[in-house]
Amino acid sequence: MRRLVLFGLALAVLAGVAGVALWASSGSGGVQPPGWYARTVYPLEYEGAIRASARRNDLDPALVAAVIYAESRFDAQARSPHGAVGLMQLLPETAAQIARETGGVAFVPADLDDPRVNIRYGCYYLRTVLDMFGGDSVAAIAAYNAGAGAVGKWEAAARAEGHALRVADIPYAETRAYVRRVLEACRIYRQTYGDRLRRAS
């Protein structure tokens, strides 16, 4: 009996590995990973704060979750070598400016350790760059990573050629990879978590 149980467990593990291998070998472009794998590799926390700040800033909650995933893997204590802090990896000086623009009167850098504050300010900034680039998600996601100044130049060059900024137009390899990672994560978060990240109508 014990052998049968162990054999069954081994088959289950092999089936799971085969499913992941099939997903990975497809290049994952447009193919949904197995549900258990997606939930393991693409975790979701703080969905209440994500939905609330996304609604306040007219954002897709799945996009917010994808940016958090790309920035910090949902580690609220994450720190970058450049001084960015928390879930959405905000620089304290950027957060201080956002606090002033949104009526905050007592911001201190330690506030960014609070997931709700970090998500609220990160969503405000994401909305800002989306508006700056006319709602173009590729340009906005690139700006979140590389800064609006650089992306403005890339977008202007793309428009001069008669098209919107494409991922392939981004000259920074790190930013190209970042934009692809966020777009793929957004698709997976939307499909995997459904109602937990439903956009408010």
Image (cartoon, grey):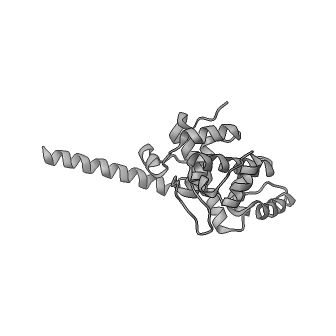
Q: Position of residue 76 (x, y in %)?
A: 53, 54
Can you say which quadrant of the picture contains the N terminus?
A: top left
**Taking 190 as reference, is 54 left or right?**
right
Q: For the point 19% across and 45% down, which residue is it? A: 5
Return the residue nearer the eye: 7 or 68.
68
Can you say which quadrant of the picture contains the C terminus?
A: top right
Q: For the point 62% across and 37% down, which residue is it? A: 52
Q: For the point 47% across and 56% down, which residue is it? A: 24
Residue 183 visible in the picture: yes
Furthest residue to the top? 201
Return the residue nearer the eye: 119 or 133.
119
**Taking 195 as reference, is 140 left or right?**
right
Return the residue nearer the eye: 109 or 59.
109
Q: Position of residue 187 (x, y in %)?
A: 58, 46
Q: How many marks?
A: 0
Q: Where is residue 74 in the image (x, y as percent from the top left)?
A: 52, 52
Say if 35 sits above or below 146 in the image. Answer: above
Residue 167 visible in the picture: no
**Taking 149 as reference, is 113 left or right?**
left
Q: For the point 32% across and 52% down, which residue is it? A: 14
Q: Position of residue 109 (x, y in %)?
A: 63, 57
Furthest residue to the right? 160
